Amino acid sequence: MLYLVLKMTHIIGAAVLLGTGAGIAFFMLVAHLRGDPREIAGVARTVVLADFLFTASAVALQPITGVWLAWSSGYSLGDGWIAASIVLYLVTGAFWLPVVWMQMRMRDLAIRAVETNAKLPAEYHRLFRWWFAFGFPAFAAVLMIFWLMIARPVIPYWD
C-alpha cells in the first residue's frame, strides 16, 4: 500500500510540474503579448504564487518519492534511465530557479509601471526574453524525464 501511495504522489508531482510549468508559461506569454502593465502585474502575481505553492512543493517531493520508489523497487540510482532522469531534473532546476527570480522581478517592474502610470521599462523586456528562452530547455528536460519514467530504456553507457 505504501508503494502505491508513493507512486501516486510521484506521478501527481510530475503532472503538477508539467502542468504548472505549461500553464505559467501560457499565461505569462499571453499577458506579455497584450502589453498592458496592469494585466502583466496581475498575472505575474498569480504566477509567482503558483510557483511557490505548487511547483516548489512538487520540486521538493519528487526526489524524495523518486528515491524511495527506486529503493522499494530494487532499482539503483545509477541505473541509466534513473541517472539520466536525475541529471535532467538538475538541469530543469538550474533553469527554473533563475526563472522564479525573473518572474518576481518582472512582477515588481510591472507593478511599478502601474503605480507610476509608465510604460514597462527595458529591464522588463530584457528579463522576459531571458525568461522565455530559459523555458525551452527546462520544459524539454521535463518532457524527457516523463519519457524516461515511462519507457525505462536501457542506457548502456550509464548501466
Image: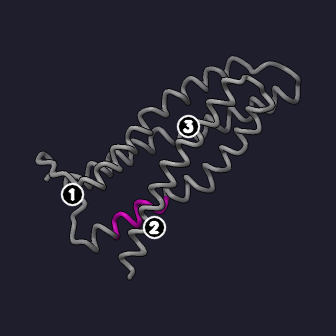
**Whole-percent x and y of residue 96?**
50, 41
Q: CA distance from mark 2 to mark 1?
A: 22 Å
Q: Quadrant of the N terminus?
A: bottom left
| Numbered disc 1: secondary structure | loop
Query: Which numbered tag is attached to residue 99?
Result: 3
Q: Residues within 10 Å of mark 1 (few under 14, many from 20)?
A: few
Mark 2 vs 1: CB contact within 8 A: no
Magenta-drawn stretch contains 52: no
Q: CA distance from mark 3 to mark 1?
A: 29 Å
**What's drawn in magenta, residue-wise?**
60-68
Residue located at (76% from left, 30% from top): 110
Q: Residue at x 66, y 23 (%)?
A: 33
Which residue is label 2 attached to? 9
Q: How many marks?
A: 3
* Residue bearing mark 1: 78
Q: Main secondary structure of the magenta part?
A: helix
Q: Earlier in the sequence, mark 2 or mark 1?
A: 2
User: Magenta stretch containing residue 62, yes or no?
Assistant: yes
- Residue 8, by quadrant, is bottom left
Measure the alpha-carbon separation of dots 3 and 2. 25 Å
In the rendered structure, are the residues bearing label 3 and label 2 in contact, judged by CB atoms less than 8 Å apart?
no
Please state the horizontal and vertical placement of residue 121, each as a whole percent of the image. Answer: 73, 19
Decide: is 94 above or below 82: above
- Badge 2 amino acid: Thr
Q: Determine whether the residue tagged by mark 3 lies in a helix, strand or loop.
A: helix
**Residue, x 73% and y 32% (percent of image)?**
40
SS label for mark 2: helix
Who comes first in sequence, dot 3 or dot 1?
1
Mark 3 or 2, which is nearer the eye?
2
Q: Is residue 97 above or below residue 117?
A: below
